[in-house]
Image (cartoon, helix red, strand yellow):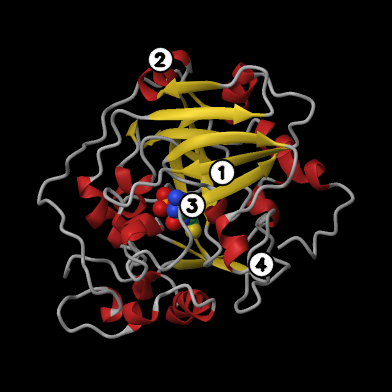
Amino acid sequence: MSNKIHSSEITPESVYLNRRQIIKASGLIAGSALAPSTANAGFFGLFEDEPDVPEQAVYQPKPLNISKKVPNNLNEALTPESKVTTHNNFYEFGTNKGDPAHYAKAFNPEPWTIQVDGEVAKPQTFDMESLLKQHAIEERIYRLRCVEAWSMVIPWLGFSLADLLKRVEPTSKAKYVAFQTLYDPERMPGQASRGFGGGIPFPYVEGLTIAEAMHPLTLLSVGLYGKTLPAQNGAPIRLVVPWKYGFKSIKSIVKITLTEKEPPTTWQVLAPNEYGFYANVNPYVDHPRWSQASERRISDAFRAERIDTLMFNGYGDEVAHLYKGMDLRKFY
Ligand code: MTE
């Protein structure tokens, strides 16, 4: 694994290790998986069964027809594609930043369907091929700010989640939207091994309020850098909510359910004192174990530049009204 990018090169090691310690503290990594293994080169030797991967990728991203390029007002350099696709969080394919690019090589996201149900008048299952024809694909350049205090600027391709939700006609009882990632341990090695997958509960689940889900900035992404999504970035369809910490942007979605009650979300279930349901980017509320005041902007530079973190990741003008009357110091 000499070509792997070690998280410690990018994220301060203390932060990275701490996030792992939470998982350990919650008792979610099986004792046996923590036993050091000399038989393979897994993450710090923590897991025993390193998955097999083919030399060649099974699936290659394809060019997408882009209907509209939303002007980039950010005035910030794009994160190089080579970084966007090799520095990932996708625990279904391992916990190290370089793992998803390596272990998702065997993951073919075609064919794919996405079921939309719950508090809707017209529940439907959509297939990806049709979705790509039915929805005009826009390019939107958004910042992505991970809760681990690193960030990128990514040219996403996709369409507003609202456009899909309108097609199923939400009822008046729909107050929240729950999302679910594919559960397929045979194709997602992190789901098959508690050590390799960090011991988080699978399938990965996330949620938004209906107002957040219907907000025009909330994107269902089907691609980046002009092509369909690489497997490691959440192929074939993922959420991108630019004003929230990256863990809200759930990958490889198979199910969307509109609900009356707030749905459980993976990181909140795992560590409710550290990860909230709202998880809006907020430089004034530190993570209990590290500061959120600044972030490392990932680039080709040997040392990533440290920049100030912006309230709502810089999207406050568009989204602050959603949280009127809420105590911004509390909803981490
Ligand atoms: N979705 C799933 N299913 N599994 C994951 O582990 N990680 C989240 C989010 N979506 C994750 C996920 C986190 S913590 C981040 S920061 C972003 O994906 C990272 O997206 P990227 O790898 O495309 O940069």
User: Label 3 vs label 1: CA separation?
Assistant: 31 Å
Whole-percent x, y for residue 321 in the image: 81, 42
Query: To which residue does mark 4 refer?
Result: 272
Whole-percent x, y for residue 203 in the image: 46, 51
Query: To which residue does mark 1 refer?
Result: 74
Q: Mark 2 vs mark 3: which is more N-terminal?
A: 2
Task: Give residue 99's quadrant in the image.
Answer: bottom left
Binning the other alpha carbons within 10 Å of mark 3 as few (below 14), some (14 to 19) or many (20 upward) gives many
Q: Residue at x 25, y 44 (%)?
A: 107
Relative vertical location of residue 184 with respect to residue 266 in this rendering, above or below: above
User: Label 2 vs label 4: CA separation?
Assistant: 40 Å
Three-letter code, disc 2? Lys
Query: To which residue does mark 2 refer?
Result: 133
Three-letter code, disc 4? Pro
Three-letter code, disc 3? Tyr
* Callout 2 touching callout 3 (CB < 8 Å): no
Q: Nearer the viewer, residue 93 or 330?
A: 93
Q: Residue at x 54, y 49 (%)?
A: 205
Quarter of the image with the C terminus is bottom right
Side of 91 relative to 150 (left or right): left
Side of 141 relative to 161 (left or right): left
> Which numbered circle lies on residue 204?
3
* Callout 4 touching callout 3 (CB < 8 Å): no
Q: Secondary structure at mark 1?
A: loop
Q: Residue at x 57, y 23 (%)?
A: 164
Three-letter code, disc 1? Leu
Q: Mark 2 vs mark 4: which is more N-terminal?
A: 2
